[in-house]
Image (spheres, grey):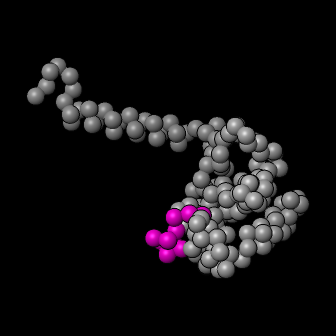
Amino acid sequence: MTFGGPTLKERRAQRVKQRRRNLKALATTPSRALGRATYTGTTAAPAPKAEKAKPGKKAPTVAERAWMDWIVARGCVACQRDGLGHRAAAVHHILRGGQRMGHLHTLPLCDPGHHQGGQPLGMVSRHPWKARFEARYGTEHELLAELQLAYAIETRTPV
């Protein structure tokens, strides 16, 4: 039953066409204009957070942004230790006394998986099982030290 407007089938077809146009426009837009990571590997890396900081937080400096982009492109450090190869990662901030230590004190962990929500996938997540995670992979500071050494060697830039 129509009342002068498009039928349900016609509306669905219009939505599909619009989605295709949006995807085509998105594919032709440069990744930096979209605020996405520029990693060009085979696995899509999550987009880094926007430059503007939340209230009470500091926006990352150029060096901090370079570090976080590098670790995201590198992939989940725990998956690599498990021999699972590259898996897209999110930035995990290391805490001291419940507070973030800063953007240079971060680890790349997959999400869901080793960052959080990994129990159904058979993974040991950092949240909420920090003790189990550190028993299996080493402390967060040990993992960070290994990453900082690899970053310094690869980029010839100390962290």
Q: Is residue 123 toward the left or the right of residue 133 in the image?
A: left
Nearest to the observer: residue 38 or residue 79: 79
Q: Position of residue 95 (x, y in %)?
A: 73, 59
Does the magenta portion include 139?
Answer: no
Q: Is residue 150 above or below residue 26?
A: below
Majority SS type along the magenta span:
loop
**Residue 119 inside the magenta-drawn segment:** yes
Image position, residue 29 (x, y; %): 58, 38
Segment tinted magenta in the rendering: 114-123
- Quarter of the image containing the N terminus? top left
* Residue situated in front as seen by the camera: 111 or 33: 111
Q: How many marks?
A: 0
Q: Position of residue 27 (x, y in %)?
A: 53, 42
Residue at the far top in the pictured view: 4
Q: Which residue is outermost to the front?
A: 97
* Left or right of 103, for residue 118: left
Tell me which residue sits at (58%, 66%) in the image.
128
Check the picture and name the quadrant holding the C terminus: bottom right
Q: Quadrant of residue 5?
A: top left
Q: Quadrant of residue 105?
A: bottom right
Residue 104 in view (yes/no): yes
